[in-house]
Amino acid sequence: MLTAVPEAEGADPVGGKVVRPVSLGVLHRNDRYPHLYWQNFLALDPARGVSADVLIAEADRLFSDLPIRHVLVADAEAAERLRPGFLKVRVSGGGTRDHGVAAAI
């Protein structure tokens, strides 16, 4: 039996995907597919002028139980500004999680 979930909550009872606003943008999560970047990501609000460290900390919090971290930045300039911070985490071996930032142009 399926239970209808109000659209305002942003849940898909069949597919398991949840889309909801968070402080830095919009969270996209699908617990049925925890290893798929395109199902689990934070879409950054381009108006937020946050640092890579703040963004990484928020992604770590939102995806603490998943093995990946994926942030989608729809602004190429913001993505370039954030890129060095994300590369620093990857190069320093920031734990077992993979941090990635992508720019959609």
Image (tube, helix red, strand yellow):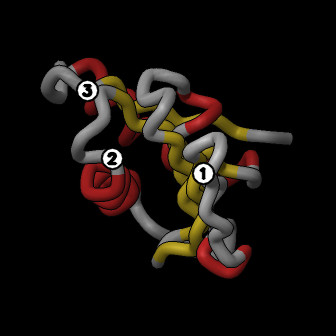
Quadrant assignment, res 79: top right
- Which residue is most to the right? 105
Q: Is residue 4 left or right of residue 97?
A: right
Front tag of 1 and 2? 1
| Element under disc 1 | loop
Q: Position of residue 103 (x, y in %)?
A: 70, 39
Residue at 26% from the left image edge and 18% from the top image edge: 91
Q: Position of residue 64 (x, y in %)?
A: 23, 46
Marker count (numbered): 3
Q: Position of residue 86 (x, y in %)?
A: 39, 36
Q: Which of 93 and 36 lies nearest the eye of the viewer?
A: 36
> Looking at numbered disc 3 in the image, what kind of residue is underneath it?
Arg
Disc 3 to disc 1, C-alpha distance = 36 Å
> Looking at numbered disc 1 in the image, what kind of residue is underneath it?
Met
Vertical position of residue 79 compared to residue 57: above or below: above
Vertical position of residue 64 compared to residue 99: above or below: below
Residue at 46% from the left image edge and 78% from the top image edge: 23
Name the residue beneath numbered marker 3: 97
Q: Position of residue 66 (x, y in %)?
A: 30, 35
> Looking at numbered disc 2 in the image, what kind of residue is underneath it?
Phe
Residue 83 appears in view: no
Give neighbour class at mark 1: few <14, some 14-19, many 20+ (Cα, 10 Å).
Answer: few
| Element under disc 2 | loop
Disc 2 to disc 3, C-alpha distance = 10 Å
Give neighbour class at mark 3: few <14, some 14-19, many 20+ (Cα, 10 Å).
Answer: some
| Element under disc 3 | loop
Name the residue beneath numbered marker 1: 1
Name the residue beneath numbered marker 2: 63
Which one is earlier in the sequence, the residue at label 2 or at label 3?
Answer: 2
